Amino acid sequence: MYIMKAVKFIFVLAILASSSLMLSAQIAEEAIITESSEPEEIEEVLITPLDDVVEKTLMQERFVLPYDPIREADLFWEKRLWRVLDIREKINKPFAYPGAPFFNLVVEGVQKGDLKGYGDDEFKTLLTPELLEDMLFRIDTTFVTNPDTYEDEMTIVKNEINYEDIKRFRIKEVWFFDEETSTLKVRILGIAPVRDVLDPNTGEFLFEQPMFWVYYPDTREYFARHKVYVPGNDANPLSWEDFLEMRMFSSYIYKESNVNDFRLVDYPSLSGSDEFSGVQRLLESEKIKAEIFNFEHDLWSY
């Protein structure tokens, strides 16, 4: 009996010893394979230095409050206006800031799909990528000398429109009186960059044309994530949504809602010419602004 137990014990020890030998051989083989394998290449990660005191993320996390709902029954009075914003005016210089021009911001948003571009100021015709590309790129033909044959060959060049070529923007807005709060308010409806159309032969100015429109209420979230350069405290920058809502820009009226759908330039001139002169249009623009102010003033009695 003792002999049988001893035999079983020796048998178990033999099995354990063989298992440990096999395990050791496997580990050694894996070690040899690992040592003989080529070392992996470590990718070099370039860390961009922080160009500030601290990384600023508050603007990216900002929440835009929706507009107050307006009941149609409380809409006592309204008037639609179209304005021209000239970025060459001193107060409008933030629109042409070289580090982040407003035109590039709008175009980038439309190209990436963050904004929708429309072909009209009533926001009915959605802009296709093909039409957008035709507006953003100008096809020119030029002659280039072939270095082999020394002959002039006609070459088609595709030039992208520079933000410096966009000197004006158009703004569509609506002024209305809310009976619930007894206040006169204004809301921007659309913004459009305007380009100059030149004669292809002489290069002379022909007319100006809005490239596309963006529906402003849908752009507020996008504009709120992008900083606008305004002289002052760089620690608390304004977003484009703040800048536009606070109306920190200068503009003049070129059209108001009327029965003939006339622009100010289409008004018959008092001097007998076919259209208003530049001075007459500015005076009429100031007259429209004064009428809105007087309308609100006359609603109250003192």
Image (cartoon, helix red, strand yellow):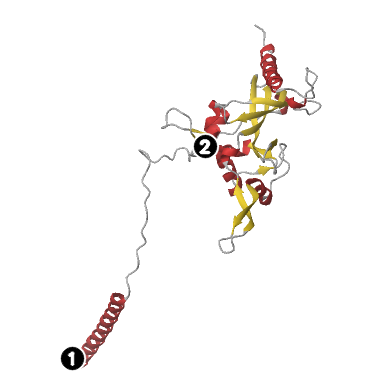
Q: Is residue 29 or residue 26 the one in the foreground?
A: 29
Q: Position of residue 265 (x, y in %)?
A: 74, 26
At horizontal 70% and vertical 22% (from top left) the residue drawn is 281
Structural crowding at the residue carrying mark 1, measured as other residues with C-alpha within 10 Å and reported as few (<14), some (14–19) or many (≥20)? few
Calculate the distance from the C-alpha at mark 1 to the C-alpha at mark 2: 85 Å
Structural crowding at the residue carrying mark 2, measured as other residues with C-alpha within 10 Å and reported as few (<14), some (14–19) or many (≥20)? few
Of mark 1 and mark 2, the one earlier in the sequence is: 1
Q: Is residue 113 above or below residue 98?
A: below
At horizontal 62% and vertical 29% (from top left) the residue drawn is 85
Q: Position of residue 210 (x, y in %)?
A: 68, 38
On residue 223, the disc is none
Which residue lies most toward the top here? 302
Contact between labelled residues 2 and 1, with CB atoms less than 8 Å apart = no
On residue 2, the disc is 1
Q: Left or right? Give the position of 149 relative to 21.
A: right
Where residue 256 sits, quadrant-wise, is: top right
Q: Nearer the viewer, mark 1 or mark 2?
A: 2
Q: Is residue 261 above or below residue 301?
A: below
Mark 2, residue position: 63
Q: Is residue 30 above or below residue 11?
A: above
Q: Left or right? Give the position of 97 relative to 20.
A: right
In this rendering, does residue 210 appear at all?
Answer: no
Tell me the quadrant of the picture where the N terminus can be found: bottom left
In this rendering, does residue 10 appear at all?
Answer: yes
The type of residue carrying mark 1 is Tyr
The type of residue carrying mark 2 is Phe
Q: Position of residue 124 (x, y in %)?
A: 73, 41
Q: Is residue 56 above or below residue 288?
A: below
* Mark 2 residue element: loop
Q: Is residue 299 or residue 72 the one in the foreground?
A: 299
